Image (cartoon, helix red, strand yellow):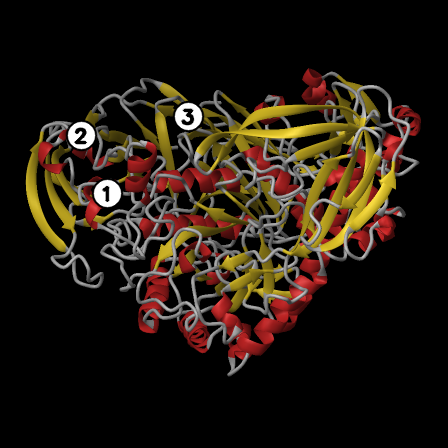
Amino acid sequence: MKRLASGASWLCIIVPFCQCLVDYQLSAAVNPGTFATPTANVRPRFRYWLPDASVDVDTVVADIAASGSLGAGGIELLPFFEYGGQIGSQPAGADWSTYNFGTVPYRNLFAAALSAHEKHGLVMDFALGPNQGQGVPANQNNTGLQWDLVPFTAEVPDNGSFVGLIPGWGTGELVSFATARVTSNKTITFEATGLLGIENVTYDQYVLSSGSLLDQTAQVSANGTVQISLQGKEDGQHYRIFSFYQKLSGNKNLQFNNTSNGSIFDEGSYVVDHFDAKGADTIIQFWEEHILVDGIREQLQNSGHYAWEDSLEILSNVSWSRSLPSRFQELFGYDIKPFLPLLAFRDNNIGLQPTEPGSFECILDTDDQGVGYINDFRATLAAGYQEYISTLTDWTHRLGVSLSLQPAYGLPMDMQTVIPDVDAPECESLSFLDSIDLYRKFAGPANLAGRQVISNELGAVKSSAFRYHLPELLFSANRGFAAGVNQYVIHGQAFSGNYYQTTWPGHVAFDYHFSEPWSPREPVWEHGFEETLNYMARVQHVQQSGVPKIDVAIYNKESATSLQTVYELPELIERGWNYNYLSPENLELPQAVVENGVLAPEGPAWKALVVQSGSNLTLSAIATLQSFAESGLPILFVGAPPKLYPTASKASNVTVFEEHLAVLEATEGVYTINEDQLADQLSTLGLCPKVSTNTNGTWYTTWRETTEGGYALIYADLIASSGNVTVADTRTPYYLNPWTGTQSPVLVYEQDLTSTTIPLELAGNQTAIILFTDSNNTCSVPAYHVTSAPAGVIGADFTLSGGLGVHVTTTVNDGEAVLSNNAVCSIDGSGVPAAFELTEWELIAEHWEAPSNISNVEQPMTKFNTTHSLSVLTSWLDIPALVNTSGIGYYTSTFMWPTDTTNTTASTLGAYISFDNVLHSLRVQVNGNQIPPLDITHARADISAYLQPGNNTVTAVVPTTWWNYLKTILDTLESSGLLPLPLVLEAVAGQPLPGASDEGLMPGVHITPFKRVVC
């Protein structure tokens, strides 16, 4: 079957399905609108960086309206305070006490923001606290604040006696004083990446005799002294003592210099305990007392959406809660205190403290080196964190909103364990590295738990402020879509008004470092951004519809989340298999049932479960897999045997593990295969992907099933490619165009009794969405369709009056299209003009520059035009007068139509226009007619309806980013009293400024004539 471009056919403007999504958490209908016009509920939102509550409220309201008019669903209100004071102190003139989070001015601004959302039909997310939402203003002695566990150690004299003050006495409340015999020790140095680059990190490692760990806290006197005698060491060994103290960390998510201490607002804001309900209660009490008054509670019910918390960027020596020892005892039945020395290393913030793992590491002289105790500790942290989440969840539901947060990753916990506890779990493009595999790890637990929304903080890229292009944003978004992410919060929107010690172009969060301070001052804001937001909204509408159906589940267990690829072999992807990951804790959820050989049939409906080479398998997971296999679910062990995931439980030993594993492997329906046999084994079992692929590139697929139809999404990774998708569905297929909101019948495909095969050509980073339904009463469909056509057929269309027509180029001579009614349609492209490139262009460059008074952000910018004649399109960097220019390019070119005035087939001729490389965004007019929005990953459109005999004019409007201009005046700019960070890095670390970026309309604008042949 020959391939046919996917985008051309009869367009039906309104997609028929207007379903009601169900908010899983609130059991309430959420109106998503239609595919063509999604509501705010399913549109992307902007993270909105509020400098502080002193800013002009009317400007905030105007910013909200501006984002809504652009196509966003609202904002996520984040009181920034210069990243909680971590980037810079409060600028001169600011008063962060008076305008702190939760003060009367903040409450008034919060109410105004909610009102603006309600007025414009938007919904608002809001941070639970200042900065990243990880705490609130509080009394510094509040026991619901973050706790820290501080370790100390000292060597016992060679005679085995220690008399005196224990190490660290006075640091805090003594939790444990322990002793252990060290059988060997060494000093280790390694390289780690810190804030200032690569650093050398040195620590001491002690190997402890497993039977020698003793908790001797009872021996410590009230004044911190102890007298002990330890005997029995061998030559080369020594004893050590260990002291552990718990204390309120005093860590803040908002800190600033202030001499007054008259109220909690003078102290900034403290991080709360994230491993106990008391931390959540502290947040709740603050909100009830300081924010949810004067009608705000009622406003939240009208326009509030998600209460939100960012990733857990909280620091410590050892992650801790005062309730942890008792929780640990309850969960595991033994006392953690003797084993605290094993927790002193890399059990703080793994993501943010790589250069501060701890000054010493203790391991046991056992087979698992004491990892079982660490695993139990981390499971206890997760249990406390789940209690924190559930307490916040119950409260937000009482308010009529839901909870969204970025769960667990970065801290020593397995994020997959806690993802199901979050109403709308959120990941991020930055930490997840735009990795489809990592997103699959995140999506699996959410899919199983029935979470309708998987959110993502999108578009934070280092060293990209003001030089971030929309195709980069789409790259990040599409990779998330391909893995099941279906809601984006764009990083971010800038406050557009004046602020202290801030010049034009306005307040810039993260000091000109991270992308992107979107605002109406961006050239693209009113020149193409709307199309991208509408694209994202429509894909989100599809990806939040119905239920995701996934082909295969892959077992995955980690003690602490590592943001690394799990399944690295390409064969599943190459054959179109869709998969994601589940942890053993996920397999214990009530939704994890097997019926008719399918796991979670009412949800993702996984057809098989894979345990890949060397997986960490728990004893409980073996029992669960045994039950699944006996219920008919295929279990496939791939590659090397799994390893025991140890705990300190006496039942958790290798012998018991191997016995249970042997029984499982001998069970009918359990298979042990080599790594390269997985796809073949799935086929041998009679299984096939819901959406299989056969392509010369790499395509990722998803499938969503609704009561009236199914949606296939196909994403082409990185490079242009072609091939076929075969969908196990025989309902009528329709293309959905997320750029225009239109729907059209697929006109070229093959179908048998069980499946539909559709040829596709996709550009790199392009998506295609195909709806399968028999419930469509809006679009007319021909009585027959094309099953194959020559390569020179580049499109097709259907109208009731004009029938089914194929678009034939000059490359086809005496070809045939085969129809589904077994008829043959003769195709001849002779007489069709050859494709040609538009080369002669006039460019009017509208220069955008700073206002005359750069200190007044609200003063209109300086704008002026220059005109340039271009025989060949090129980057603005290659046009001397535009090298340091930002703004808008208005490009005009002309061509004659038809190109051959003697052509006798002119009445049946049409043409496509295509743009090979869109750097940022693009709007196009033909003869003064605005053509529909272009897919900027593959900018191509049928312009036949706009052509006229004789001279035809093409106008392209192309915005740039700001960087090429801003870098020339960077030393005159400041935000909140800070110089742009790129200048600081250049001066302090010798890091060169980010380079200039290509801008403008690039070469490769083609007109491709065709003849419409009716079949």
Q: Camera-side residue: 341 or 464?
A: 341
- Rate crowding at label 2 as few (under 14), some (14 to 19) or many (20 or more) other CA atoms within 10 Å: some
Give the residue at mark 3: 719
Q: Camera-side residue: 699 or 754?
A: 699
Q: Is residue 323 left or right of residue 748?
A: right
Query: Mark number for residue 610?
Result: none
Q: Amino acid at mark 3?
A: Ile
- Above or below, 198 against 170 in this view is above
Percent position (x, y) of residue 645? 80, 32
Q: Residue at x 37, y 56 (%)?
A: 493
Give the residue at mark 2: 874
Marks 2, 3: nearer the viewer = 2
Percent position (x, y) of residue 810? 27, 22
Q: Amino acid at mark 1?
A: Thr
Q: Is residue 589 left or right of residue 32?
A: right
Residue 764 can be seen in this image: yes
Q: How many marks?
A: 3
Percent position (x, y) of residue 407? 62, 49
Question: Contact, CB < 8 Å: mark 3 with mark 1?
Answer: no
Q: CA distance from mark 1 to mark 2?
A: 14 Å
Q: CA distance from mark 3 to mark 1?
A: 24 Å
- Above or below, 93 against 312 in this view is below
Query: Mark number for residue 960?
Result: 1
